[in-house]
Structures are given as C-alpha cells and as structure tokens.
Amino acid sequence: MPLYIKDPAVDTLVDQYLAATGMTNKTEAVRRALSDQLQALADKETLTDRVARIQRRAAEAGFVSPGSDIAADKAFMDEQWGED
C-alpha cells in the first residue's frame, strides 16, 4: 500500500533531513530515517537489562542488600500515611 503524506510539517522535516544528510530522494530519506529509528529502538537497552547491569556493578563493588523485612516496611509505610 503506497504511503501518501500530505502534511507540510512532515515535508519540511524531510527537506531538513535531505539537507542534513546530502540525500536527494525523499523516498529514500524516509526509508532511511524510519529504518535508523527502528534500529535505534531495537538496540535500546531494556529496563530489565539495565537493572541487572546496575545490580551486577553494585555486587562487584561490594554492596550487599540487607534483604527485605516486609513487616518493618509495612509498619514504616503505615506510619508515613498516618495509619498506625
């Protein structure tokens, strides 16, 4: 299905992209811009990976989590909310 975009703002963006890249073909410019953006999204580190990396670095630095005391955490939160 062909893509027809009739938006002056998009046309201006494509013209700016053409000028910045030295490209001359609008179709190729849109193809490359979309392809590059999709690749950037695919390469983006997930939150899970980022947290795992930070946890590894913390462990390597000697940080040890004291664990979780659910009862103490609940008591603290209840106190903060005025729910003694």
Image: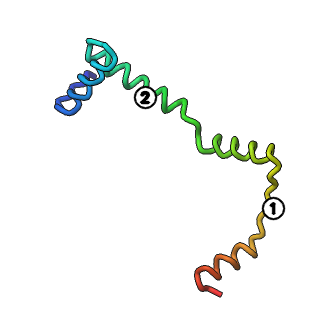
- The secondary structure type at the circle numbered 2 is helix
Quadrant occupied by the C terminus: bottom right
**Circle 2 sits on which residue?**
37
| Identity, as a three-letter code, of the amino acid under mark 1 | Pro
Report whether 33 appears left or right of 2. Answer: right
Q: Residues within 10 Å of mark 2 (few under 14, many from 20)?
A: few
Q: Which mark is residue 66?
A: 1
**Point 34% across, 17% down: residue:** 21
Toward which corner of the image does residue 80 lie, by quadrant? bottom right
Task: Look at the image and tell me in which quarter the N terminus lies.
Answer: top left
Q: Quadrant of residue 49?
A: top right
Q: Is residue 49 left or right of residue 43?
A: right
Up the image or down, 44 lies above or below 55; here it is above
Inspect the image, locate mark 2, and give the three-letter code of the amino acid beneath it: Gln
Asked if marks 2 and 1 touch (Cβ < 8 Å), the reply is no
Q: Nearer the viewer, mark 2 or mark 1?
A: 1
Q: Position of residue 61 (x, y in %)?
A: 80, 46
Q: Earlier in the sequence, mark 2 or mark 1?
A: 2
Tell me the residue at 68%/77% (across/down).
Answer: 76
Q: Please identify the quarter of the rendering in which residue 78 is found.
A: bottom right
Q: Position of residue 81 (x, y in %)?
A: 58, 81
In this picture, is 69 found above or below 46? below
Residue at 65% in and 82% down: 79
Q: Nearer the viewer, residue 62 or 24?
A: 62
